[in-house]
Amino acid sequence: MNGLFGDISRRDFMKYCATTAAVLGLSEMELVSKVSEALAASSSKAPVVWLEGQDCAGCTISLAGALNPPVSSIILDKLSIRYHETIMASAGYLAEAVYEDTVKAGGHVLCVEGSIPTADDRFCMIGGRPFREMVKESAEKAAVIIAVGACAAYGGIPAAGPTKSVGIGKIVKDKPIINLPTCPVHCDHLVGSILYFLATKSAPPLDKIGRPKLYFDELVHDNCRRRSYFDDGLFLTDWNDPKQKNWCLYEKGCKGPDTYADCPVRRWNDGQNFCIDCGAGCMGCAEPDFYDGMSPLYTAESERSRNIMARKEAGLIPPKEKA
Ligand code: SF4
Ligand code: SF4
């Protein structure tokens, strides 16, 4: 078979699709075959407009880390990235013209990275225009809108500053938005959501704050390997004490009991590791009130942390059954 993956047999291709779909959480049989069809179809190059507002480009870097499928395959073979400030070769009037043509034609995948200031448009201007206006106009005819990362989804770190920034859901109110929080976005969440859209022409099932249930249905706490220490009240207080090495990180500010995300299972960097297994508590970056609502990050002094302990003491976080 010539095409996306070069000269490979149909059997190998189907195996590849099944593996990819499983890795991305799209493993139901029906989805596997739809993903295969979408990947095999040569006419499915979806135009993408990727806007960057108040961001650090960390989500772009996270996408560049996608190995399954590799980001080069996605970008060169399945998507036509028409406009992306960080990676596009063109600049100035030429780039803006491509943006305008794509947005006017419609049917594009709109990815927004970064938040939108509401205190004053001048906090984020692109090509002399308010970013807020660009988000609105590019959303109008988009086939699907994805808020890439915590900032675009709910405001993120910039929302803790003076710009009074918000996620795109507060600006675009008449269309569904796929919110992919975490800071940065997890490349599997992004690639999986795009593949789901390519395969079904619809957004994946979302929870009530717009996150795909495929990835945000379970608490970090419920899949954490330090969970038995939480249940037994053994909390790490001294980073330098080897005896406490694997204990629960609640006293170090972990917000895992209040955060829905599949990080302990999916892990990061091609499944290598994630925050808690590196020894840092979960900062709650998948939740709408990250960053302000989760701070201070590395002590149990936030209101969130107090609520977690109150719920534990009231028996509202029952110990996990031992396997
Ligand atoms: S509080 Fe954090 S470190 Fe402790 S068990 Fe829950 S998720 Fe794991
Ligand atoms: S473990 Fe928590 S802080 Fe780390 S990426 Fe996942 S949701 Fe964010």
Image (cartoon, rainbow, N blue to C red):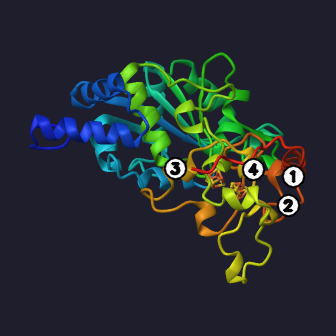
Confirm if mark 3 falls within 8 A of ligand 2: no
Q: Tag 4: residue type?
A: Pro
Indicate which disc, 3 or 2, sits on the residue closer to the N terminus.
Answer: 3
Label count reads 4
User: Which is more toward the observer, 141 or 221?
Assistant: 221
Confirm if mark 4 falls within 8 A of ligand 2: no
Indicate which disc, 3 or 4, sits on the residue closer to the N terminus.
Answer: 4
Q: Marks 4 and 1, how far apart in space?
A: 28 Å
> Which residue occupies 28% across, 36% down?
18
Q: Which residue is mark 1?
A: 309
Expressed as whole percent of the image width and height from the top left, the position of residue 125 reads 67, 43
Comparing labels 4 and 2, the label whose residue is closer to the camera: 2
Q: Tag 1: residue type?
A: Met
Q: Marks 2 and 1, how far apart in space?
A: 9 Å
The residue furthest front is 322
- Whether residue 270 is visible to the viewer of this picture, yes or no, is yes
Confirm if mark 1 falls within 8 A of ligand 1: no
Callout 1: SS: helix
Indicate which disc, 1 or 3, sits on the residue closer to the N terminus.
Answer: 3
Q: Which residue is mark 4?
A: 158
Comparing labels 2 and 1, the label whose residue is closer to the camera: 1
Q: Which residue is mark 2?
A: 300
Q: Marks 3 and 4, how far apart in space?
A: 28 Å
Which mark is drawn over residue 265? Answer: 3
Comparing labels 3 and 4, the label whose residue is closer to the camera: 3
Q: Tag 2: residue type?
A: Ala
Callout 2: SS: loop
Callout 3: SS: helix
Q: Marks 1 and 3, how far apart in space?
A: 24 Å
Q: Marks 3 and 2, how far apart in space?
A: 24 Å
Expressed as whole percent of the image width and height from the top left, the position of residue 112 reads 57, 38
